[in-house]
Image (cartoon, rainbow, N blue to C red):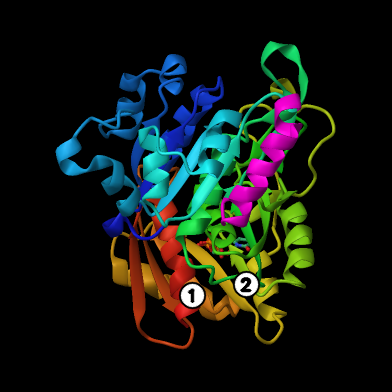
Amino acid sequence: MPDAAAAPRIVVGVAGGIAAYKAVSLVRELVRVGADVTVVPTESALKFVGRPTWEAVSRNKVSDDLFDDVATVRHVALGRSADAIVIAPVTAHTIASLAAGLAGNLLGTTVLASSAPLVLAPAMHTEMWEHPSVRANMATLIARGATVVGPETGELTGGDVGAGRMSEPEAIAEVVQSLLVPQTLVGQRVVVSAGGTREPIDPVRFIGNRSSGEMGVQLARAARARGAEVTLVAANLEVPPPTGVTLVDAPTAAAMREAMQEAATTSDLVIMAAAVADWVAAEPTQEKLKKTELGETFSPLLHRAPDILGELGASKPAGQLVVGFSAETAVDSDQRETLAREKLRAKNVDVMCVNQVSDQLGFGNVETIVTMIHHASPQSRSVTGSKHSVAGQILDALLDR
Ligand code: CTP
């Protein structure tokens, strides 16, 4: 998404299908990432989900009626001001109306009055989806530039199984977002690590950290939205990964080292956003440790974990950009920058992103400030906002270089 200052305006059209209830999550997700969303349900969509729900989740007035607000020429204004229109679910009936260019309801006029990208997320029974008239209407809409998400194969209403299930709201939201950001990373391969490693002490206990994985996940999502081919190396994520990326599970420092080294050999941009353990248990036991045997104090022998970023920095091929994250508890920003600059030099990375953490600060989906330090410049640059917004700003700043 573009920066929060210019919230993109998105029209979410909802046609009359049971999947309308899933569109509630789509609207919530688009609002969450900073979009100004107006929902335009068809009359039959309102039989599935009512106006108050749409108004509550979109935080905007909802109308399906062409004759509401005639003085503001609403049927044209909505379409003209939209940065994108997504119709989810789009039914066989609405697909036919769109293909024919019908203007019998507010959704039809909005689409006709708009030159913004149109995203369609169909949902219907398999027989309908495969019917030649639906196929022909879809071909017409695709030829006019519509982007189609799904439908997926799965369980349909009434217990049938087949093609026709609406794609998940997150997947639709990601397609919409990718239409709103410039495709600056097409052809680039990006690997991002995210989350916090957990180092086993015995089969049930581990040494871990408080990283939720939010920052790394948002970076992977932002890179994907800009057209990159993305690998997300994930350690114990507490947040859902984005769709459209290759997900590699790496729960421990050792697994992450292997996954990152492999992915880095073919990547143009390497981002280490994961919180990796600095020490791992020298000899994790196969059996559960017993209090009765250990007594009142217990100090497991810990060994230094590999410094993955340091290794990647030391062996980076020409042209590859390596980015690290430095979570610092120092309250003074100059001191944080000094510490981060030392890490940048020691690990031979190109850019270090510094943020302040404490037990109250920095973890999860919260507002954040990240200062970017470049190896080639004494100047730093700070970006601020939600982690979603900060991730996009970091990628755009890297591209400025
Ligand atoms: N990092 C890594 N491997 C480790 C530890 C850290 O690759 N074993 C990476 C992190 O992913 C991050 C950067 O190094 O990108 C800095 O991590 P941070 O924990 O701030 O620094 P450390 O080098 O671990 O130093 P310290 O904990 O002493 O501050």
Image side of residue 322 versus residue 156, left or right: left
Q: What residue is pinned by disc 1?
A: 398
Can you tell which quarter of the image residue 24 is in?
Answer: top left
Q: Which residue is mark 2?
A: 269
Answer with the quadrant where ligand 1 appears in the image. bottom right
- Alpha carbon distance from label 2 to label 1: 10 Å
Taking the magenta stretch, the answer to whether it contains residue 135 is yes
Q: Position of residue 170 (x, y in %)?
A: 55, 40
Q: Quadrant of residue 396?
A: bottom left
The answer to the question of whether label 2 and label 1 lie on touching residues, with beta carbons closer than 8 A, is yes
User: Residue 22 location, x and y as percent?
Assistant: 52, 27
User: Nearest the camera: 326 or 353?
Assistant: 353
Q: Which mark is residue 16?
A: none
Q: Residue at x 71, y 40 (%)?
A: 135
Element class at badge 2: strand
From this viewpoint, is residue 170 visible? yes
Q: Percent x, y for residue 92?
A: 61, 30
Position above or below: 359 against 290? below
Q: How many marks?
A: 2
Quadrant of the rendering where the N terminus is positioned: bottom left
Q: Amino acid at mark 1?
A: Leu
